[in-house]
Image (spheres, rainbow, N blue to C red):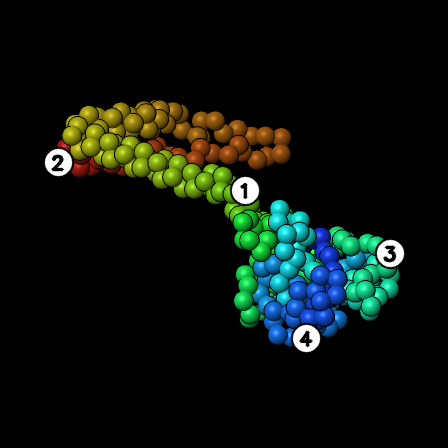
C-alpha cells in the first residue's frame, strides 16, 4: 500500500462491519472483491475496488483498501460513506474487538474521520467524491484540498523549484525595471541636448542668409558700394592734406637746457606728399574695380 502520492483528501463519517459469511450480527456474506475478510479491508458505496488510502482519528492513523460495498442505507444523504473493519475501528476509538459478537466495546458505532486516498483501484467503482450506493447524488462536501504536508513529493519538489526560479528571476526583474526607469529619466535630458545642434544650425543658416543678402546687395548696387568706399577714403586724404600744410618740424626745434633738440616730425614735406599721392591712387583703383 502506497502513501507517498495522495490523490484525494476529505472528511467522512465511518461505521464498522465484519462480513466473513458467518451470518453473525448482520453478516451479509463474503466481501465483493473476493478478498477474504481481514483487518484493513474497508467498504465504500462508490469508490473503485482496490482503492488504497488511510484514515486519521484523534491522532491515530490506520491504512485501508476498498474490498467491499457498503454501507447501504446509511450512505443515503451523504451520511455514512465509509465502512471500516471492526478491528481497525476498535483500535481508532481505543476499545476492544469482540470476536464472538462481532462488536466493538463501548457501544460507539459511528465516528468522523479524515481520509486520504493514495491510489485509485482498478476494480468496479467511480473515482472522486464518494456517492451513496443508489448513485442519487455526489457528495462533493466530502472532498477538500490536500494539506501541504500530504501533497505528493513531486509537487513539493515542483513548488521548491518554482520558488527557486522566482528568487532567481526577481533580481533580474528588478534590474530591468531599474534600467527602464533610468532610460525614462534620461530621455528629457537627451531631448534638451538634441536642441543645441538644432538651434546652432538655425543660427548658422540665418548667418549664411545674411551673408548671401549682403553679397546680393553688393552685386546689385555696385555704384552705391563704390561711393561708400570713396567716402571712407576721404578722411584719410584730409589728414594727408593737413600734414602737408603743417609747418616744417625744424620751425619747432629749439635749444634746451641740456643742449638737445625736440624730436623732429615723423614726416617731411616730401614724405607727406608721397602719402597723399599713394592714397589718392588707391582710392582711384578701388573706384575703378567696383565700377566694372
Please give the name of the residue rendered at 72% of the width and 56% of the height, measured from the top-left corner: 14
- Badge 1: few (under 14), some or many (20 or more) residues near its Cα, within 10 Å? few
Classify residue 248 as left or right of residue 139. Answer: left
Residue 188 placement (x, y as % from top left): 49, 39
171 w.r.t. 161: above or below: above
Report the quarter where the N terminus lies: bottom right
Q: Secondary structure at mark 3?
A: loop
Please tell me the numbered disc located at residue 185. Answer: 1
Cα–Cα span, label 2 and label 3: 140 Å
Mark with earlier residue (4, 2): 4
29 w.r.t. 74: above or below: below
Front of the two marks 2 and 1: 1
Q: Which residue bears the numbered disc 2?
A: 292
- Badge 2: few (under 14), some or many (20 or more) residues near its Cα, within 10 Å? few
Q: Which residue bears the numbered disc 3?
A: 106
Q: Secondary structure at mark 1?
A: helix
Mark with earlier residue (3, 4): 4
Q: Are marks 1 and 3 in contact (CB under 8 Å)?
A: no
- Near-viewer residue (220 or 259): 220
Cα–Cα span, label 1 and label 3: 79 Å
Classify residue 277 as left or right of residue 144. Answer: left
Please give the name of the residue rendered at 39% of the width and 36% of the height, measured from the top-left corner: 199
Residue 226 placement (x, y as % from top left): 20, 29
Q: Secondary structure at mark 2?
A: loop
Cα–Cα span, label 4 and label 1: 79 Å
Mark with earlier residue (2, 3): 3
Classify residue 178 as left or right of residue 10. Answer: left
Cα–Cα span, label 4 and label 2: 136 Å
Amino acid at each position: 500500500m502506497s502513501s507517498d502520492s495522495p490523490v484525494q483528501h476529505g472528511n467522512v463519517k465511518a461505521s464498522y462491519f465484519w462480513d466473513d459469511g458467518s451470518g453473525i450480527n448482520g453478516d451479509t456474506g463474503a466481501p465483493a472483491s473476493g478478498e477474504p475478510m481481514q483487518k484493513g479491508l474497508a467498504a465504500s458505496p462508490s469508490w473503485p475496488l482496490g482503492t488504497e488510502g488511510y484514515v486519521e482519528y484523534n491522532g491515530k492513523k490506520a491504512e485501508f483498501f476498498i474490498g467491499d460495498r457498503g454501507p447501504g442505507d446509511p450512505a443515503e444523504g451523504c451520511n455514512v460513506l465509509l465502512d471500516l473493519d471492526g478491528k481497525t475501528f476498535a483500535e481508532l476509538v481505543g476499545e476492544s474487538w469482540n470476536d464472538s459478537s462481532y462488536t466493538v466495546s463501548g457501544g460507539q458505532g459511528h465516528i468522523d474521520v479524515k481520509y486520504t486516498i493514495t491510489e485509485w483501484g482498478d476494480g468496479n467503482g467511480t473515482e472522486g467524491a464518494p456517492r451513496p450506493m443508489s448513485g442519487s447524488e455526489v457528495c462533493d462536501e466530502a472532498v477538500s484540498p490536500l494539506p501541504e504536508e500530504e501533497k505528493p513529493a513531486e509537487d513539493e519538489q515542483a513548488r521548491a523549484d518554482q520558488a527557486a526560479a522566482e528568487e532567481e528571476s526577481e533580481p533580474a526583474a528588478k534590474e530591468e525595471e531599474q534600467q527602464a526607469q533610468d532610460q525614462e529619466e534620461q530621455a528629457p535630458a537627451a531631448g534638451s541636448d538634441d536642441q543645441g545642434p538644432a538651434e546652432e544650425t538655425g543660427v548658422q543658416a540665418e548667418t549664411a542668409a545674411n551673408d548671401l543678402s549682403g553679397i546680393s546687395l553688393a552685386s546689385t548696387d555696385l555704384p552705391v558700394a563704390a561711393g561708400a568706399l570713396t567716402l571712407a577714403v576721404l578722411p584719410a586724404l584730409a589728414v594727408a592734406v593737413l600734414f602737408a600744410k603743417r609747418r616744417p618740424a625744424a620751425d619747432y626745434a629749439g635749444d634746451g637746457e641740456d643742449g638737445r633738440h625736440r624730436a623732429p616730425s615723423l614726416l617731411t614735406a616730401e614724405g607727406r606728399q608721397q602719402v597723399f599721392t599713394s592714397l589718392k591712387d588707391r582710392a582711384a583703383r578701388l573706384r575703378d574695380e567696383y565700377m566694372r
